[in-house]
Image: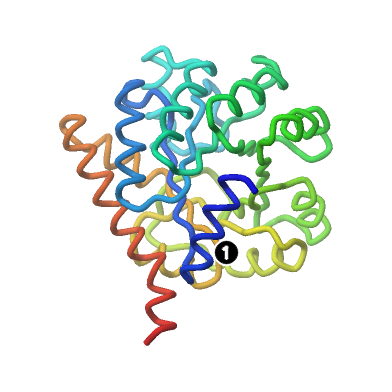
Amino acid sequence: MTALADAFGRARDEGRAALIGYLPAGFPSREGSVRLMRAMVEGGVDIVEVGLPYSDPLMDGPVIQEAVGIALAEGMTPAGVIDVAGDVAGSGAATLVMSYWNPIERFGVDRFAERLAAAGGCGVITPDLTPEESADWAIATAAHGLDRVFLVAPSSTDARIGQVAAECSGFVYAASTMGVTGARSAVSDAAEGLVARVRAATDLPVAVGLGVSSGEQAAQIAEYADGVIVGSAFIRVVLESPDLEAAEQGVGGLARELAAGVRRRRDRALS
């Protein structure tokens, strides 16, 4: 059983959804990103997505693009991302890398998987890699014990969802909206239906991302999903903080709010 399966299993045993937090490695600096991700874990994040900064982030909204630009200016590299993931994994949280495919392919598919596994990472989310093009990645991740996470969207057909889910391990990432990433004032109505369609195709956990920014939204998604993914909201806290210490406090506070949100399902069941 992988660290990712353990994290979802613990959340399930507690009658709640798992909380998944994202930040780019190297934002606002290498050491700063490690400190912030550790603060997320201390605040209640179960699973950490370490973003690999990329110069052409097609799916990312302006908030993540700004953070990625800062990380790239700081000199963050794929090798550095693996090192950051290892440092974060030392906190005890299940730690994945989230990356577009091009940087992994250029780094070397097997080399990336081998080094991430050796550092303590447990998997990789590849939002732009399709099952048809993932044969080499499947071999590399299986060889090094890493989970593979692919995305489905509201526009995905049932057949496509089944095909994507069959190539996943760890969990299936359900993008709740069409379009780029970014915190939103309301969660898409399509999310719950998408989760139900994924559940019909696989027994893997289903986590919902794109748009979550508050404890109330986290509670809403936790009613029907196995995991709640938050990224842009954490980044915005950092961007609006005057210094790293304030950012740590802000990120920890948001994590606590979100962690309370994913636990409301359990609290309602017990009442």
Q: Position of residue 67 (x, y in %)?
A: 38, 29
The spot of residue 139 in percent (x, y) is 80, 31
Looking at the rendered structure, the secondary structure element under dot 1 is helix
Residue 98 percent across, percent down from the top left: 55, 35
Tell me which amino acid carries mark 1. Answer: Ala
| Residue situated in front as seen by the camera: 43 or 134 | 43
Q: Which residue sits furthest front? A: 1
Please name the residue that numbered disc 1 is placed on. Answer: 191
Residue at the spot x=78%, y=58% of the render? 157
- Which residue does the image show at 49% across and 32% down from the upper left? 51
Measured as percent of width and height from the top left, residue 53 is found at 49, 24
Q: Is residue 123 left or right of residue 185?
A: right
Q: Does 219 sit left or right of 255 as displayed?
A: right
Q: Quadrant of residue 256?
A: bottom left
Relative to 190, is 98 above or below? above
Question: In the figure, 244 relative to 107: above or below?
Answer: below
Taking depth in this image into account, of 260 and 70 the one nearest to the observer is: 260
Count up the numbered dots.
Answer: 1
Q: Is residue 189 left or right of residue 64?
A: right
- Colour style of the rendered protein structure: rainbow
- Kindly identify the residue that appears in the image at 66 percent across and 41 percent down: 147
Q: Quadrant of the C terminus?
A: bottom left
Q: Nearer the viewer, residue 217 or 257?
A: 257
Q: Residue furthest bottom?
A: 271
